[in-house]
Amino acid sequence: MLQQAEERSLNYKRTSVGPVGATLSPGAATRVHHESRIVGRSPASFDAAVASLGRWACHAGISARIHRPDTSIEDGRTLLVVLPAGPVSIVVPNRIVATVDEPDRFGFAYGSLDGHHERGEESFLVERLADDRVRCTIAVDAHPATFVARAVGPAITALSHVALRRYLRAWEAAIRNSGPGPTAEP
């Protein structure tokens, strides 16, 4: 099943709804839902947030695993997110469509591929602000892509928002558990 999903994902068609990478700049996209959290105020907090993205720690929040977890964060990389659904798993294909690697900002956005139940983009961004606070932001701009998803559209949207909050909680936990240094603020 995973091999078929990998092969199918080679036939990439851009399916995001706005400009590619728009979720990395929430003001640029029209229907982006995003949530942010301040996760610390130290260089160690920033480094831990960046490292946890590379380990795909956010995805633990939705009990997902990444097929080939050594997949690096690079433009054009295919990412298969495997979601448990009772006795079976759902393979959710995505492609990394934009990355940010600057001294005070790091992140990526991935867009949905054929076979995904939504059409759109999600992004994960960590920023060191001018006052040294570290902010993690996850954004999504997605719409139902299949007949079934459209039929239960509001439920899919609600689940997407729940997933976003769970991603953030898992990201925060990974930062907290990374060792000494990160100092969370209230």
Image (spheres, rainbow, N blue to C red):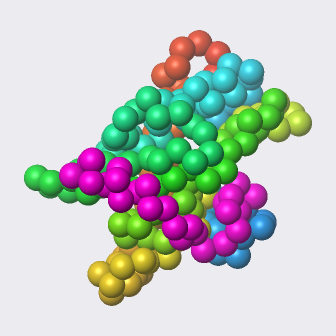
Residue 92 location in percent, x, y?
Answer: 36, 57
Residue 15 location in percent, x, y?
Answer: 54, 70
Residue that protrudes farthest toward the left in the picture:
87
Chain part drawn in magenta: 1-25
Residue 31 location in percent, x, y?
Answer: 64, 75
Is 34 left or right of 168, judged from the image as shown? right
The C terminus is located in which quarter? top right
Q: How many marks?
A: 0
Most foreground residue, 81 or 46: 81
Question: In the image, is residue 84 part of the stretch drawn in magenta?
Answer: no
Most foreground residue, 13 or 170: 13
> Residue at 70% across / 37% down in the picture?
106
Is 168 left or right of 98, judged from the image as shown? left
Q: Is residue 158 visible?
A: no
Residue 14 location in percent, x, y?
Answer: 56, 67
> Residue at 26% across / 48% down in the picture?
2
Question: In the image, is residue 12 part of the stretch drawn in magenta?
Answer: yes
> Residue at 38% across / 84% down in the picture?
150
Q: Based on the displayed image, in which of its 4 quarters is residue 134 positioned?
A: top right
Q: Is residue 100 visible?
A: yes
Is 20 left or right of 144, judged from the image as shown? right
